Image: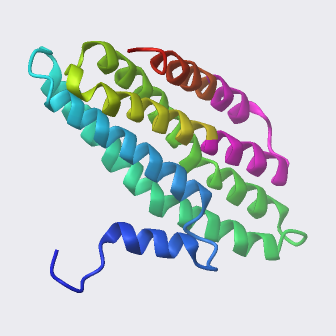
């Protein structure tokens, strides 16, 4: 990086810390999922004894790319909620649709985190032993992303007075992610 330039990570964090509404919690959850996926890819690529290492790394790259896309999608979806909330009384259908839309990115984050933690937990056991800490970190970050995204889905669902269907599925996936994180913490 040229001297004096600012990294995209710093820019993202500066935006996250600003007064603007987006990026916010959904973007942060998506970034955690992207980081977890990147670690899974790195551990897989460095685990030469693992026959499916390259396929795992390629899949993790796709998860990371999608999580990065969700950072921006979450902000756009939330912006629509802000606009629709101003006319909530006049157009309650638009408001509910906007809030339901705001659940899409966090819902995808939970789904990604579920896959990331599954593969990450497997890499804790089968990946390169010198990278076990990185695989454990991937699982913990994935579980954190699932936790945060599930909370956002619950809050959005209550705010928009939506059906609880998505909340139940998100909680099941979050709990599975958390169980994997708890399990890998005991691996030595």
Q: Quadrant of residue 133?
A: top left
From the viewer's perspective, tell me whether residue 187 is left or right of residue 173. Answer: left
Q: Position of residue 121 (x, y in %)?
A: 39, 20
Q: Which residues are magenta?
A: 148-172
- Quarter of the image with the N terminus is bottom left
Q: In the image, what residue occupies the spot 46% across and 54% down?
A: 70
Which residue is nearer to you in this view: 91 or 175? 175
**Predominant secondary structure, magenta span:** helix
Q: Is 186 situated above or below 161?
A: above
Q: In the image, what residue occupies the spot 36% across and 25% down?
A: 120
From the viewer's perspective, tell me whether residue 78 is left or right of residue 10. Answer: right
Q: Quadrant of residue 159?
A: bottom right
Q: Is 123 situated above or below 135?
A: above
Which residue is nearer to you in this view: 135 or 115? 135
- Quarter of the image with the C terminus is top left
Q: Position of residue 104 (x, y in %)?
A: 58, 47
Which residue is nearer to you in this view: 138 or 101? 138
Q: In the image, what residue occupies the spot 63% across and 64% down?
A: 78
Q: Quadrant of residue 136?
A: top left
Q: Is 181 situated above or below 11?
A: above
Q: Position of residue 107 (x, y in %)?
A: 58, 41
From the viewer's perspective, tell me whether residue 110 is left or right of residue 129. Answer: right
């Amino acid at each position: 990086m040229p001297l004096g330039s600012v990294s995209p990570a710093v820019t993202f964090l500066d935006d996250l810390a600003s007064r603007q509404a987006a990026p916010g919690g959904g973007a942060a959850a998506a970034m955690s999922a992207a980081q977890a996926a990147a670690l899974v890819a790195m551990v897989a690529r460095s685990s030469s004894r693992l026959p499916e290492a390259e396929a795992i790394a390629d899949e993790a790259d796709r998860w990371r790319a999608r999580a990065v896309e969700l950072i921006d999608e979450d902000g756009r979806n939330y912006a629509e909620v802000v606009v629709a909330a101003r006319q909530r009384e006049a157009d309650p259908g638009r408001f509910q649709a906007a809030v339901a839309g705001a659940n899409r990115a966090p819902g995808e984050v939970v789904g990604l985190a579920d896959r990331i933690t599954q593969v990450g937990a497997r890499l804790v056991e089968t990946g390169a032993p010198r990278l076990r800490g990185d695989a454990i970190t991937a699982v913990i970050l994935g579980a954190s992303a699932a936790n945060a995204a599930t909370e956002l889905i619950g809050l959005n669902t209550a705010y928009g007075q939506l059906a609880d269907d998505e909340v139940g599925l998100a909680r099941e996936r979050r709990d599975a992610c958390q169980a994997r994180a708890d399990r890998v913490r005991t691996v030595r």
